[in-house]
Amino acid sequence: MQGRFVRLAETGRAQVTIHVDGAPVTALEGDTLMVAILASGRHLRRSEFGDGPRAGFCLMGACQDCWVWTEAGDRLRACTTQPAEGMRISTSQPGATWASLT
Amino acid sequence: MGQPDVIIIGAGPAGVRAAEALVGAGLRPTIIDEGRRAGGQIYRRQPENFRRPYGELYGTEAGRAKALHDGFDALAGRVDYRPETLVWNIADRHVWTAAGGRQQALPFDALLLCTGATDRLMPVKGWDLAGTYSLGGAQVALKAQACAIGRRVAFVGTGPLLYLVAAQYVKAGAGVAAVLDTSPFAARVAALPKLLAQPGVLRDGVALTLALKRAGVALHAGVEPLEVLGDADAGVTGLRFRDGRGRERAIGADAVALGYHLRPETQLADLARCAFAFEPKTRQWLPERDGDGRSSVPGVYLAGDGARILGARSAEATGRLAALAVLADLGLPVDAGELADLRRQVAGYARFAEGLAEAFPWPAAQAGKLPDETVLCRCENVTAGDLRRTVREAGAKEANRAKAFSRVGMGRCQGRYCGQAAAEVVAAEAGVPVEQVGRLRGQAPVKPLPIAIEEDAP
């Protein structure tokens, strides 16, 4: 699948491998997590309010549309977080199932 | 007496120039910035391992960007600089920060709010589809990450940034589908006398438009955006709009950059209890300040686009001016000639900004025309119809009351991207002037904070 973002320059940087929903993704040093994911993927998460996939919006830490999670459940703002070697990211909130609501 | 505690929030053009003035007077200010590197948004710095030169990144503003970055770097060791730090509250003469999972309350004698701006947004049906980005976000992708937001990008909205970012995309080799400006061309002509207050900037703006035309990019003025086309799986696939002659048209695009000039980030001024006033020209609420940047609260000062949208050049001047006001209020000497010169500069920028507001007006009337099914709040998928029902059925004609009933403005962006359009929707539905609807109150924390709760052993 073709990524949403297009890299136009600065592609000679060192590579960093992260995992997104269990699959390996090659990021470049200096990327934001958002760019790393959207350079090969189409979205970052799904809206909790039922209106489909989201891929971020403001890229400057204001809208909070780009939340992703570590597999341990910590929330990350993808536009202001840098990928680190071995990082394991989930595009859905781990363990966010509430027994009383199911 | 020890040194006064002076805190600057924001390390963009206003904050950096304010810090320089304070350091020049022998003070050691604390600079708190959410960014990873100083520079703010317009002069945002790329990561350390990127190689593109200043000219490629900042175009005609390369010299100013470099001067600002160098100016900041020269302050090293003489300021308490705290990057990647969020100020989430101001209360009891303390600034509350969060960084790396730790929080702190810092007391202040003087506080300079240089909080900058974000894109001002008018929703359009389908803007919740993946692939719609704020115009500023589209620029950040290019400037800070050397990426385009898509293969064929439609630039939609109004304001000088629309042409700047589109031209930057063309220059960087990205695909630009079209530039669709809601402002009629005639408004630009009418605003010329005021725009001539900054002839150099005006010339640069015209040059951008010509560069886009030369590149074969379709430019439309006086358009009405109707719908971002696409579906949940693909995201954006195109855009439907009415052109300046009233004809309905559609273009293909896999990304939309949407922005209607800027809105100031005023939540912290609100939490600091600054008084606000409605500015009819831009239809925005702004914190009140005197000509030098003093707010209504003693010891709290405002500078840059966070106080009023006057642009990056003005931010450098208002930042320095506000710092001189701090020094004067602390009883320190200030050069009267410099004060007068800065005030004169800012007056020129203000006249130009007034011209921009007339040339590229906020299309308030669009809010009333949004189809009921248009998502107004992207955070929580609340539609224009939901908000209108709140006005009709619950009688909510005030911004905060309408928010309480509809949840528009209550989501994770805290009203930054829906608040101003929502006020226009309420005003249109209730048949009252938008200033009567009021403004959303800032709430702490001004951005979401992580909550860590450890699990007890059973």
Image (spheres, rainbow, N blue to C red):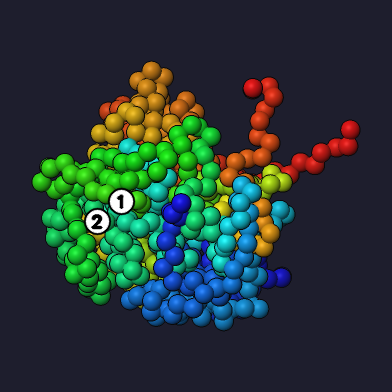
Quadrant that contains the C terminus of chain B: top right
Give A5 or B304, whichever is nearer the viewer: A5
Give B146 or B286, whichever is nearer the viewer: B146
Indicate which disc residue B253 carries: 1
Image coords of residue B314 (percent x, y) = 38, 68
Indicate which disc residue B178 carries: 2
Q: Residue reaching furthest left?
A: B245
- The quarter of the picture where residue B317 lies is bottom left
Give B50 or B348, whichever is nearer the viewer: B50
Count of numbered circles on the image: 2
Instruction: Please name the residue shown 45% across and 77% down the image.
Output: B52
Is residue B171 depicted above or below A88 in this figure? below
* Identity, as a three-letter code, of the amino acid under mark 1: Ala
Point out the frontmost of discs 1 and 2: 1
- Residues tagged by mark 1 and mark 2 found on one chain of the structure: yes
Is residue B219 depicted above or below B29 in this figure? above
> Badges 1 and 2: C-beta atoms under 8 Å apart?
yes
Q: Determine whether the residue tagged by mark 2 lies in a helix, strand or loop.
A: strand
Image coords of residue A37 (percent x, y) = 53, 55
